[in-house]
Every structure is written in C-alpha cells, then in structure tokens.
Image (tube, rainbow, N blue to C red):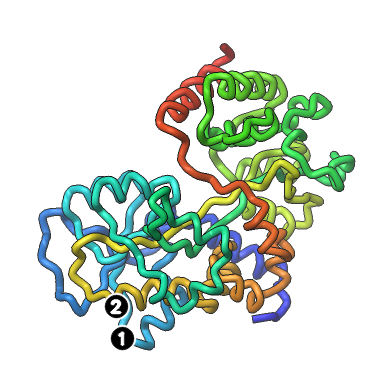
Amino acid sequence: MNNPVSPNAFRAMLQARGLSRRTILKTLASVGIATVTVPSLHQRARAGSDDLVVFTWDVYAEPEMYQSYFEAYGKAPKFAYFGDLQEAFVKLQAGYKPDISTTGFESIRRWRDAGLISPIDTSRLVHWPDVFEKLKGSGTLEDGIQWAVPFIWGSNSVIFRTDLAPEYIDNHTWEILWDPKYKGQIAMRDSADEAAVPAALVAGVADPFNMNDEDISKVRDRLAQQRELVRFYYGDNTSLAQSIASGEVVAAYAWSDVYAELKAEGVPVAFMAPKEGILTWIDLSVLVTDAPASDEMRYAYLNTTLAPESGVFAIEEYLYGHANRKAFEQANPEVLKELGWADPEAVVTDGVLLKPFAADTQEKINRLFEEIKAGY
C-alpha cells in the first residue's frame, strides 16, 4: 500500500471521487452497469434474516469496504441507495426496514426523535479503541448514548494559489476570503451553510451552529463584505478547479479533493489549516430499529466499516478520511501528503465539526444568504 502514486493514477482517483454519491449511479447506468436501488416501500417482505441490508451512499458498496464481513459470512451485504439524507429519512419513516443505514451528524437527533434508530453497544466494536476520540463524540447527543458510529470524514477549507498570494503561505486564515487585495478573485460555494460558518468564525462567533440575532447580524455583515469581493458563487467543483488553475480565482472555499486534483495537475496551490479551524464533515452508521437481521450480523458490518483495510481503501480510492487512526498508518503517504493529512490527528482534533444549525438559525441563514446574493 506504500507505492508512490503517479500523477495519472492520482488523477484517476480524483475522477472516481468526483463521481461519488449522487452522480455515480447515473454514470454507471450510462455505460450499462446496473445497480441496486431502494425497493418499493410496499415491498415489505425481506429475503430472510440471514441477509443484511445496508441503506447508504453508493460509494460505500465497494467490496473493499466490507472485507471482514465477507470473510465471516461468505457473501456480501445487500445494498440499497439513497440520493440524500432527506430521502433516507422519508423512506425509513414510511416503513422501509434495512438493517443498517448511513446518516450524517446533522441528522442523528431527527432520526432518534422519530424512533428510527437504536443505541449502539460500543463494547461490541472491536476497532473502537482506535477511533479518533473527537469523532467518537459525533455519534452521541446530550443523553450520552452512542446513536451512531463514525467511519468516514473529510475536510473543507481554503484553497489558494501560493504563487499569487504568497503572503498567506505561512498565514493560514479564513480572512483571505475577505482580503480586498483579491477583489474579483475570490470564489465561495453557493451554499448558505458553507458560506455562513467561515463568516461566523472570522466574525468571532462562539458557536456558529447556535447563533443569536447579534451573531447572525455579524454573519450578514461579513457575507455582505465578501459579496463585493466574490467573482462567483459556485456549485460545480470542476468549474472551480478550472478557475483556480487559470488564475482567475486566487482563493476559494473548497473541498479537499479540489486541492488534490490541482496538485496532481501541477498547479501551485495550498490547502489551509486555518487558525480559526478547518471544517470537518462526517458520515456515520446507525442501527435501524426493529430490523430483521441479527445483531451479530449488524455489528459485524459496523466492525468492517471501522477496519483499517476499509479505511485505507476509502483514503486511497475516494480521498476520504477514516475514523480509524490505524488506516492512516497503512495508507499511501503520498496520498496523505497531497490531501494535507500527514497529521490526521491534528486535522480531526483541531477541526470545526460540521453539525446542524439550530432550527431558527437555519431559517435565518438561508434567508439572509439569498438576500446577500441578490444584493440587498
């Protein structure tokens, strides 16, 4: 696993990562590869309790992600896919009964309150001692119960051209996205959530996810200032990467795979670890309440997602981080270097964990972001 990665091979990894989740199903279908989708909600019968059904993102169904489960049971789990977490919630609430589902930190409370998931006994997780301590807490709520098991994460931060903004090479800060020197050369993701959190961090808001009206006013002011500097708000990572490569954009809010893509192309860029905090997202597994499969099978699957070999595959093939620190010890160091994860413990520990906004905060953030983009 420690062979050097050629630029072409690394580029192929990035292209595979770019087709993840929502787009990969359509891409596979276009070349004649069939995939399993969620069964009709009226199809209540299951093939039997000896089948484990996992409701998840498409990228997590690769055989390398469940090696130990296959070795234990001699067959793969059955997979059903969703397009987003809202779709997953609606189908589970309507009565669909997989055994395991993937969720996000922002959804755990809602799923718990709806009675869709059951507590997890971490003493049955053989790799639990090797999970990053901060990530363990992402699956709990104020009740102290472990409702979910983290297994995949990633980083969002600032990507910038080191040749065009050299003063920031040793000064990693979100403030670059408000630097008037780069007016017309800044790009921000077209997302209220992803725009608001960095604005809150640079405004000194104590808790970006639970803001009062004064905090939200500070965020509005910061986003209004940024609008005067922004060249464009983007939703497409490909167009962002092209704009950075050409020099049209000097600095942008970006996901780690954009950085890795540009590095593989030889573009002089860096991915910040901002002093205000790098942003971290997490995917987690949950036990669906009253599911047919045995606990033994369900915990075997939770264990296989936490295994180091699953993590190595996720890191090298999808450019995702993994919950098990041992995966980073075994993964290709060239990949880790390109992603800025040479010290994953620091990335996880020092990062700002993305979590849901308070309900009233979310509504206000959504409204003000649209107003800012519209110019008022």
Q: Position of residue 195 (x, y in %)?
A: 59, 33
What residue do we see at 32% from left, 58% from top? Answer: 81
The picture places residue 105, in percent across and down from the top left corner, at 45, 50
Task: Name the residue located 72 percent from the left edge and 33 percent from the top edge.
Answer: 177
From the viewer's perspective, tell me whether residue 235 is left or right of residue 148: right
The mark that comes first in sequence, 2 or 1, is 1
Amino acid type, callout 2: Met
Residue positioned most to the front: 143
Front disc: 2 or 1: 2
Confirm whether residue 84 shows in the render: no
296 in relation to 57, above or below: below
- Please name whichever residue, 295 or 249, is drawn nearer the observer in this view of the structure: 295
Q: Position of residue 40 (x, y in %)?
A: 16, 55
Judging by the rendered image, the residue that carries numbered circle 2 is 297
> Residue at 26% of width from left, 68% of height from top?
53
From mark 2 to mark 1, how far is it between C-alphas?
8 Å
Neighbours of disc 2 within 10 Å: few (<14), some (14-19), many (20+): some
Q: Are discs 2 and 1 less than 8 Å apart at CB?
A: yes
> In front: 142, or 287?
142
Q: Quadrant of the N terminus?
A: bottom right
Give the residue type that dot 1 points to.
Tyr
Residue that label 1 marks: 73
Q: Is residue 241 left or right of residue 209?
A: right
The C terminus - image quarter: top right
SS label for mark 2 = helix
